[in-house]
Amino acid sequence: MSAAVVVRGVDKIFDTKSGHVTALSAVDLDVAPGEFVSLIGPSGCGKSTLMRLIADLETPTAGTVEVFGTSAHQARVDQRYGIAFQQAGLLPWRTVSANIALPLELSGMARAEVRQRVDELIALVGLGDFGDRFPDQLSGGMQQRVAIARALAKKPQLLLMDEPFGALDEMTREYMQTELLRIAAETGAAVVFVTHSIPEAVYLSDRVVVMSPRPGRIAEVVPMSLGSTGSRADDLREDASFFEMITAVREALHGGTHATAPRGVENR
Amino acid sequence: MTTETRASTLTRTPGPSRPRTRPPVGPLGRTASGAERAIAPVVLGGAVIGIWQLLAGSGLVEAYLLPSPAAIIAEIIEFWPSMLSAAGITGLNAFVGLVAGSLLGVVAALVASTSRLLDGMLAPIVAALAVIPIVALAPVLNTMFGADSRTGRQLIASLAAFVPVFITTARGLRQTQPVHRELMTSFAATPWQVMRTITLPTAVPYTFTGIRLASSLAVISALVAEYFGGPRGGLGGLISTSAASSAYPRAWAYVVAAIALGLAFYLVTLALERWASRRR
Amino acid sequence: MSDAATLLAPPRRRRAGQGARLKAAGYGLLGIIALAVASELYKWLGPADGLLIGDVRVLPRTSDLAMPHIWDMVGRLFEPVTRAEGARVLWLEIVIAAGLTLGIAAVGWVVGVVVGIGLALIMQRWILAESALLPWIVLSQTVPLIAFAPLVKSWGSRIEIGAFEWQDWMSVAVIASYLAFFPVAVGALKGLQAPDRIHRELLHTYSARWWPTMVHLRLPAAVPFLLPALRLAAANAVVGAVVAEVSTGLQGGIGRLVIQYAGQASGDPAKAWAPIFGAIALGLIAAGSVALLGLLVKDYRRTEGEA
């Protein structure tokens, strides 16, 4: 099977009021099918931009982005990926079920099929009794679970997530991370996950892509030697190997020196 | 929030004044209780009417100028059927105007949202309509449509209603959140699907706010337009004929009917607005 | 507070603003021309008796009496008002009458603004006042003002303070102010209550009492809310003045001319449209003047947003 994502020689330059901003410069990245890859780095390193290029929400100034062997644009048109933003982005006038059903309705799926798939997804993310609730009746964590269920609606083989747990408290966050790993393993999807948090990146990923700013580029790719993501559980967080990997990523972020801590990265 | 994503991250602009407004907070941080908010205006109203009755009874103010509340109530009781039928006539004109103007406003806003050219042409016209005395058109409209026709007044009411509905709907159509729009892009949704699932539902509460604002305008315009000629029998006509024959208590009775009519329109459209704004 | 903000704020793009304004004006003109063309097209192609559904005439008659040609309407402006000797040319007559109405509306506007802001201050200061007054203020706008005209006129005629005598035009101004005060009261109150908690708490740490807080925080914060309210009040004052002129029978204003020329429409249909153009111009001038006012307080309309 072809690689999930292939990024080659990508530049992205924005024209702003204050001149040109080079968000990304000469970026190469490969994501294998079923692989969990995190993008981490300080503010301005281009991690969100890179994810948005894969999602075809932006187009590269130079270079190519291929998703499952076709262009990112075609992959979006063919609905090959599911996306979750930092805000849950639920439609407030739709119930949980109706929100999850949205992409299915848009692609013209039959009513009965939609019902069935939505029930599956609600069970998958553990929101069993909440199908008829409205977003304003849900906590932040639950809203994000709805957003993830929606991202999985069409059984994509690629999940793109832009700091989806950023607005959650620490306990909920850890819970959601474990859930996400379970879901990714069950569906076999590849995941590109943007985060500010080193422990989160380490816990979730097969590989952590460390990026640096000005101009945005990949500084280093740190493979995680913590066992397959599908088999990880909460007890990993207390394991020595976990902390070793965190240290490895932190050192990669510092670019080899302990002198200055890059701003905008959490060290919790 | 990552800064490199968009050059300008638009936040959602404030929506229509939500009917469920936050309770007023005084300068010292005190909030008015629900009971206060319900009782205070009633007490004030009662006090004013009481003073009015006293003044009228004392002879300081001549009865023909400002009839006592008691005299007005007597006229209301006597002329009740006439008040109802007159209110029905004026109310019908106002209703037709409100409905026609609202429909026109929504359609025009939709059209303007799709075409830059039409938007550019409509915006100044609507801005002008908002500031000109529309009722001044009443006499010529009566000439155009015939002196026995209700259409002129209904047109005036619909022009008056059109403006706020157009403006609020146009604003509502622009209020889609960036995250929702990007979601739709990621679903490769067609423009019509985006309109149906995101743009229109977001705009609906704004439209109903506009309709609420238009409701009293429609009533007042329909009423004042009667003063400029045309078939008799509406509230405006009866107010002016009563005043002309110095039957002031009766004139004020019809004014009370006009207030009730305006209030009825306002309350109904307020309820509609609240219904439309739940869960947005 | 203001120095750092003004120094670090991004420069205003003047050029784009002017170009955009010209473009908007151009589009507006296009819109008006489109309307005129549509009207003439209807006159040319439409049914002679208009469109009747049942006995309701939905579209007007196309005769020259019912719908004069646009060029007739414009041309009539340059002819004398009446065939009498020494009669003024029509457009001049309109301008003079509109000027009078504008003056009266302006007086009404000022009074309405003062009353509106005063009420807003009272309602902001005492929460009970807001609870008690606001519903009545909202209700006041449902009362048709033609009911007030004879009343105000009679009341006014009884006021004699020394050499001061109530003039007829003052009744019109009072009615205009009645229509003007409502948007100002509501908009000013909203603006005075607008500052968010951070700013209110800041002034609280400075031990600022009610009036200094008003001057340094609430009034400046209210400017962006006041300006559209003032503009609306100006338009309302014009409407109020025109309608009040009709119901009090005031001579010399544009309202009177609307009725008068409409009465003569069977003999001179194009003339009836002249005061309407005057009234339209009046509304636009009133609103435009207030918009110019907005330029004076430009700095108070800035927000905290980043560049």
Image (cartoon, coloured by chain):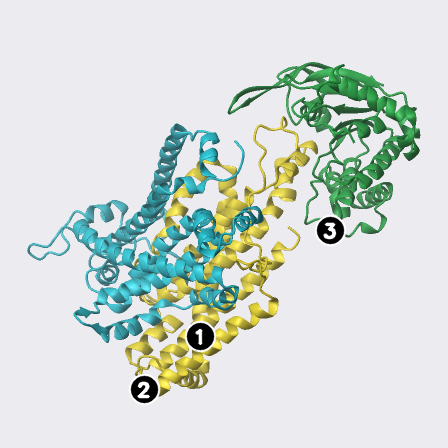
Chain colours: A green, B yellow, C cyan
Q: Amino acid at mark 1?
A: Ala
Q: CA distance from mark 1 to mark 2?
A: 26 Å
- Mark 1 vs 2: CB contact within 8 A: no
**In the rendered structure, are the residues bearing label 3 and label 1 in contact, judged by CB atoms less than 8 Å apart?**
no
- Name the amino acid type tagged 2: Gly
x and y percent of residue B248 in the render? 33, 80
- Horizontal relation, residue B99 to residue C35: left or right: right
User: Where B236 sits versus B207, above or below?
Assistant: below
| Residue B59: image tag | 2
Residue at 30% x, 70% y: name it.
C149
Q: Give the image location of residue B81, x and y in percent.
A: 46, 81
Judging by the rendered image, the residue that carries numbered circle 1 is B257
Disc 3: which residue: A134
User: Most extreme residue toward the front, as rendered?
Assistant: C207
Single out the mark in the foreground, 1 or 2.
2
- Pointer 1 and pointer 2 on the same chain: yes
Instruction: Tell me if I can see residue C259 in this picture.
Output: yes
Q: Secondary structure at mark 3?
A: loop
Name the spot of residue B90 as percent of width and height, x first. 43, 69
Q: Is residue C255 above or below residue C280?
A: below
Q: Say which label, 1 or 2, has the lower sequence index.
A: 2
Residue neighbourhood size for the residue with mark 3, other residues' Cα within 10 Å, grouped as few (<14), some (14–19), many (≥20): many
Location of the C terminus of chain A (image quadrant)? top right
Judge depth for marks 2 and 3 and give the one in front. Answer: 2
